[in-house]
Image: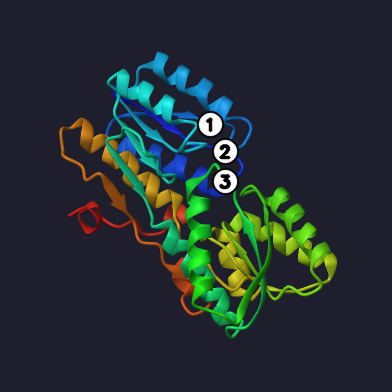
Amino acid sequence: MTTLAVFTKNRLNPAYRAARLAADRVAAASGATAVHFVPEKPDNVEQQKVLVEEALRLKPEAVVFVPADDVAMLPDLAKFAAAGIPVIVCINRMDGPCAAFVGSDDVQVGRSAATALFAGLDDKGMIVALDGPETARTCRDRADGLARALAGHPGIELVGRDCGMNLRVEGREAMERLLARYARIDGVWCANDVMAFGALEALDAAGRTAQIVGVNGLAEAIANIEIGRMLASVDFSAYKIATFAAEAAMRHLRGEKLPAVITLPAELIDRANIAAWKAPMEDRPVPAWSEIVR
């Protein structure tokens, strides 16, 4: 039976749980088995390197790979290439040898979230940013999108930023530091939904309010948008991306030619279109292969 090795980078983020489920479903539909490799410590490079060695001993037919660090994991990506094992990199783009990359335009994702925040503030106010780790290219690109959006909105001032590590507790702690530092915060731009949830907890504890946007379209974000606790999220769907990544791996093994980059659209979610997003991430419609890959 064909074995697909699937690397995700943490167990805490619901988006990665959805990604693992997507890979399982695609593998099962193709008569293959997905074997998961997840570091115990979120986004831990050294643990992911150990897992690469484990996967190499397993000798899978293909790999779906979300790197914990797009630079530090390059030598490990090369090990798969040297072993003749095709790799589909997904979510976090890498500049190394792979059969294809599957993801979304993270610069546009960050810009879309920022633009929604600015509109909610009527294009004036003081905002802060909760960034993810520098080791994640998704986070660097989303921050670039925020910067580009700010350049066109002179009434918005980015007064401070902190790193919430893409995690809830760390996001809450980062927001607590920002609240202690700034007496006025009108809006919070978050590089993912999980940090937005932590920011909400910090705001509640401090008895303060602010407009908040995130990324991922997680179920909790949808619920928060519906009741007005969050302004918007962007549908950067790890489930859809992992579905296409696993499908790309299966198609590559069947000898199909893949494009170097497969980009899935990421739609803004707000109260105007919330009804379409109430289903769990894994139950939302996934585009057909032919709709994305032409």
Q: Residue 10 shows which numbered tag? A: 2
Q: CA separation, marks 1 and 3? A: 20 Å
For mark 3, give the secondary structure. Answer: loop
The residue indicated by pointer 1 is 38
* Residue 240 in sight in this render: yes
Hey, what amino acid is under mark 3?
Glu
Q: Nearer the viewer, residue 219 or 138?
A: 138
User: Closer to the observer: label 1 or label 3?
Assistant: 3
Mark 2 or 1, nearer chain start: 2
Residue pictured at 44% horizontal, 55% vertical = 237
Which type of secondary structure does the marked residue at label 2 adopt?
loop
Which residue is depicted at the point 31% across and 34% down?
98
Q: Residue at x 84, y 66 (%)?
A: 206
Counting residues from the start of the chain, the first of labels 3 and 2 encountered is: 2
Q: Amino acid at mark 2?
A: Asn
Say what amino acid the circle numbered 1 marks.
Answer: Val
Q: How packed is label 1: few (under 14 Cα within 10 Å), some, or many (20 or more)?
A: many
The percent coordinates of residue 55 (x first, y second) are 43, 20
**Circles 3 and 2: CB atoms closer than 8 Å:** no
What residue is shown with label 3? 134
Answer left or right for 165 relative to 285: right
| Earlier-in-chain disc, 1 versus 3 | 1
